[in-house]
Image (cartoon, rainbow, N blue to C red):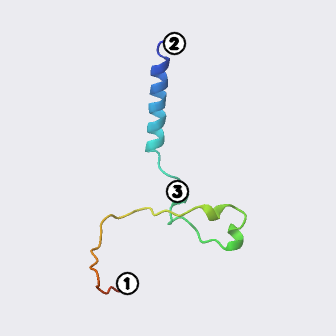
């Protein structure tokens, strides 16, 4: 019984490392999301799944006040 706290702490550490290092399910990315019709989605609960981007980029684009920009 002396080692109960140590075993619990070690088990908690191993479980947190396992969860932190695991990858996300493959079906949550935009690239693997297939296009479904309204009738295929209706009543399944899939409408509440928000797609996520597989890769993101960081940075900024400087925008000057009063300037005109055209998005293409």
Which of 26 and 19 lies nearest the eye of the viewer?
Answer: 19
Instruction: Please give the residue where the numbered disc 2 appears in the rendered image.
Output: 1
- In the rendered structure, find residue 20 and report the number of the disc placed on it: none
Which of 71 and 54 lies nearest the eye of the viewer?
Answer: 71
Q: In the rendered image, which quarter is residue 69 located in? A: bottom left
Work out whether mark 1 precedes mark 2 in sequence or the reverse, and give the earlier one. Answer: 2
Which of 44 and 23 lies nearest the eye of the viewer?
Answer: 44
Q: Is residue 43 above or below residue 15?
A: below
Instruction: Please give the residue where the numbered disc 3 appears in the rendered image.
Output: 26
Mark 1: give few (<14), some (14-19) or many (20+) Cα within 10 Å: few
Alpha carbon separation for disc pair 1 and 3: 32 Å
Q: Is residue 39 above or below residue 15?
A: below
Number of marks in the rendered image:
3
Q: Is residue 6 above or below residue 12?
A: above
Q: What SS does tag 2 mark?
A: loop
In this view, the mark in front (1 or 3): 1
Q: What SS does tag 1 mark?
A: loop
Residue pictured at 38% horizontal, 63% vertical: 56
Residue pictured at 50% horizontal, 61% vertical: 29
Relative image position of residue 6 (x, y in whole percent):
45, 21
Q: What SS does tag 3 mark?
A: helix
Mark 3: give few (<14), some (14-19) or many (20+) Cα within 10 Å: few
Tell me: 36 left or right of 16.
right
Relative image position of residue 7 (x, y in whole percent):
48, 22
In this view, the mark in front (3 or 2): 2
Is mark 3 in CB contact (under 8 Å) with mark 2? no
Instruction: Please give the residue where the numbered disc 1 appears in the rendered image.
Output: 71
Work out whether mark 3 precedes mark 2 in sequence or the reverse, and give the earlier one. Answer: 2
Alpha carbon separation for disc pair 3 and 2: 42 Å
Residue pictured at 60% horizontal, 72% vertical: 35
Relative image position of residue 48 (x, y in whole percent):
61, 62
């Amino acid at each position: 019984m002396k080692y109960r706290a140590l075993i619990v702490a070690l088990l908690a550490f191993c479980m947190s490392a396992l969860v932190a290092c695991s990858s996300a399910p493959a079906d949550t990315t935009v690239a693997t999301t297939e296009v479904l019709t309204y009738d295929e989605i209706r009543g399944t609960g899939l409408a509440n799944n928000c797609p996520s981007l597989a890769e993101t980029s960081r940075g900024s684009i400087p925008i000057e006040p009063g300037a005109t920009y055209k998005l293409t």
